[in-house]
Image (cartoon, helix red, strand yellow):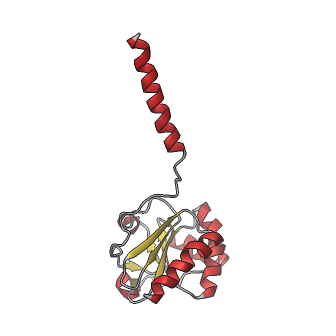
Amino acid sequence: MLKYILPLLLFIIMAVFLAIGLNLNPHDIPSPLLNKPAPVFFAPKLQTPQEKLSPDDLKGQVWLFNVWASWCVSCREEHPVLNQLAQQKTVTIIGLNYKDDPAAANNWLDTLGNPYNISIMDQDGRIGIDWGVYGVPETFVIDKQGRVRYKHTGPVTVADVQQTFLPLIAQLQGE
């Protein structure tokens, strides 16, 4: 009798874990960076590689940090949304061109529009690793003190901008 109960019990336990896993949202990947200082980088600008940018250059302002690549299908999906957000001029948008060819990235921006105030290059992926990037696109909101306040995994939608990003940006700009 015990030889039938034990496999049945193991099956039930595995079924419960499977059911829990299937109900998780894959976009809800917590970031250990939340409410901590943004990871430091000193990276070349995509369009002017002889110039570099670091988070210290952005202190005193709220900014978005959008991780993107020209080879990324989801980045193409979110790009019109970022272009619309950039036209509003409510926040500085910094792009992190992740593991990409600079010529392909510049061509992509020339073709689809450039929502970024500045885009920096991360050809070897080290900056992405420091930021805990799981894949592209990912977008972070950074406050005036340089702390990461929000992380969005996956393509940004119009609803995300209206319901999450703009209210958070307004709150952080008022602080």
Q: Residue furthest top?
A: 1
Q: Is residue 171 visible?
A: yes
Q: Nearer the viewer, residue 22 or 53?
A: 22
- Residue drawn at x 51%, y 78% is 168
Whether residue 54 is visible to the viewer of this picture, yes or no, is no
Q: Position of residue 31 (x, y in %)?
A: 40, 63
Q: Nearer the viewer, residue 110 or 33?
A: 33
- Residue visible at 38% across and 87% down? 59
Q: Nearer the viewer, residue 123 or 22?
A: 22
Residue 48, above or below 140:
below
List x then y, in percent, for residue 34.
38, 69
Residue at image point 43% right, 24% down: 9
Left or right side of 6 for 76: right
Residue 4 point in image, percent of width and height? 44, 14
Please state the horizontal and vertical placement of residue 72, each as a whole percent of the image.
57, 62
- Above or below, comparing residue 43 to residue 16 in the picture: below
- 20 is higher (above) or lower (below) than 59: above
Report the residue at 39% width, 78% height from top. 43
- Please tell me how many numbered marks the rendered image carries: 0
Quadrant for the C terminus in the image? bottom left
Horizontal relation, residue 117 to residue 146: left or right: right
Quadrant of image for the N terminus: top left
The image quadrant of residue 107 is bottom right
Q: Is residue 116 above or below residue 70?
A: below
